[in-house]
Amino acid sequence: MAPYRKPIALLVLLQFLQTCATLYLPTLNAHIIDHGVVKGDTGYILTFGGLMIAVSLGQVVCNMGAVYFGARTASAVGRDMRAAVFGRVQSFSSREMAHFGAPSLITRTTNDVQQVQMLTLMTFTLMVSAPIMCVGGIVMALGLDVPLSGVLVAVVPVLGISVTLIVRRLRPLFRSMQVRLDTVNRVLREQISGNRVIRAFVRDDYEKDRFRGANTELTEVSLGTGRTLALMFPLVMTVVNLSSIAVVWFGAHRIASGGMQIGDLTAFLAYLMQIVMSVMMATFMFMMVPRAEVCAERIQEVLGTESSVVPPTAPVVELRRHGHLEIRSAGFRYPGAEEPVLKGIDLVARPGEVTAVIGSTGSGKSTLLGLIPRLFDATEGEVLVDGVDVQEVEPALLAKTVGLVPQKPYLFAGTVATNLRYGNPDATDEELWHALEVAQAKEFVSKLENGLDSPIAQGGTNVSGGQRQRLAIARTLVQRPEIYLFDDSFSALDYATDAALRAALARETAEATVVIVAQRVATIRDADRIVVLDEGRVVGTGRHHELMADNETYREIVLSQLTEAEAA
């Protein structure tokens, strides 16, 4: 809230003025009763009645101003929090993304921020005036009748203790509620994304039961919270009504003995209600505080998490732009893991050559590729681009130098053109069509109703898997990096399209460095250099015929897909 000191100060001033006006009204009413109504002085009634109207109008104006500034400031704080969380998430590496999970990050950015924003709004509109009204009401009540004010000595502590006990019970319930909400979001997200798999395996009933279980857990926690909250207002109102009866009872005796006037009793009851209303407003706030506190902690957990991929303090802003890639004794281990995913990896990829990486599932191929664009950093060894460690290269420069086509290509909601221009916003239509032609996607894009302006759904769900892969390849071609990384980017293509695409790529990337990760032997058998991974280690490097002759791991992979004659 630091940037909003001035509107907050003005808001507090307006709340103070409107609260003072509210506290002054019962005193004016008491004067009208005691000096106007009782004595039959119509002029006195009209004079002080007009003053009451003026004070009321001032109260309304100040309250409207306070609410206006409160709403604007709370909305601005919410906007800043969402921007801060979004910005921090954008800096996360794959390690931090996996730690939090997408459903939890979505909840923290939306629902959690909304809860804190709502608490901020309620603080500005209710909580600021509550203590002023409570203290002011007590002072005004003491000014009217000190003996009768003894009722307040008993009422305020009882209310405070009751509210505190309920709030302590609410806090763990609200934390559990937010965790359950994360679970519901995760299950729902999986069911929407995996709808085809669910139908293919006819697991509708199973998924319904899974969602019902997550939903029931959230409902049970919500009911427990609701039951606890349900005690709040009846408890407060019981104390209020009992205290009102006590005031009327003792006040009647004070009036009968001549120690108090009727107007003062009326004003005292009004101040009692104002004091209790301020406590009720605080109570309403305390109902929101536990959940907002939990949400704030979850937001702070994201904001307090530093990315394991740290930008360099003195970045290299210029490379020779030759695209020479070298990996020296690189390794990667997840935090707390017993065994590293990669260990002692040595690899050299030169411009004008195609370097292929192959290995069994889980051998670390995608992890190795992720070290180059710094999706995560190597925990040992070095990854060098043009002789410079990637951890020392300015991130924007590294992004221009290295182009990655991921294993699961993702397209954004928009059009074909907006997706292709993602890495190069200034690309012309001619450049886009050329990239599509190389990626073997020109034919199907040209058949779309609007061509480059044809809509693409979120995630590219309105095109096939093979079309998504080709559009992702075209997107990288538009970027025109020095180093191309293809992470099993041809798996959804048929053999004919695969062969045509590789032939076109060979011409397009003739002067660039190309690294291909693939499961399909036919895709990489003609590579200039093939690196064989097994359980995170390099167990062989060479051309196809060399590895077939002396590398058993590579030979097993090849013969699992091809016959001996085809392999030869």
Image (spheres, rainbow, N blue to C red):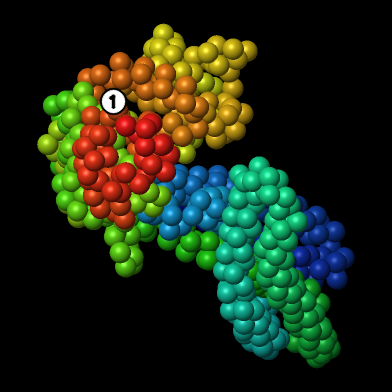
Near mark 1 (Cα within 10 A), the count class, few <14, some 14-19 or many ≥20, is many
Which quadrant of the view contains residue 314? top left
Which quadrant of the view contains residue 18? bottom right
Q: What is the three-letter code of the residue carrying label 1?
A: Pro
> For this rendering, which residue is in front, 318 or 7?
318
Q: What is the total number of numbered labels drawn onto the structure image?
A: 1
Q: Is residue 3 left or right of residue 246?
A: left
Q: Position of residue 241 (x, y in %)?
A: 80, 80
Q: Is residue 363 left or right of residue 317?
A: right
Q: Position of residue 545 (x, y in %)?
A: 25, 34
In the picture as drawn, the residue positioned furthest to the top comes out as 430
Image point (61%, 29%), residue name:
462
Q: Which quarter of the image is occupied by the C terminus?
A: top left
- Disc 1 secondary structure class: loop
> For this rendering, which residue is in front, 324 or 458?
324
> Is there any visible trace of residue 65 in the rendered image?
no
Image: 561 above or below 437: below
In the picture as drawn, the residue positioned furthest to the front comes out as 565
Q: Position of residue 174 (x, y in %)?
A: 60, 68
Image point (43%, 58%), residue name:
99
Q: Is residue 242 left or right of residue 335?
A: right
Image: 430 above or below 315: above
Image point (35%, 46%), residue name:
556
**Residue holding disc 1:** 481
Which quadrant of the view contains residue 216? bottom right
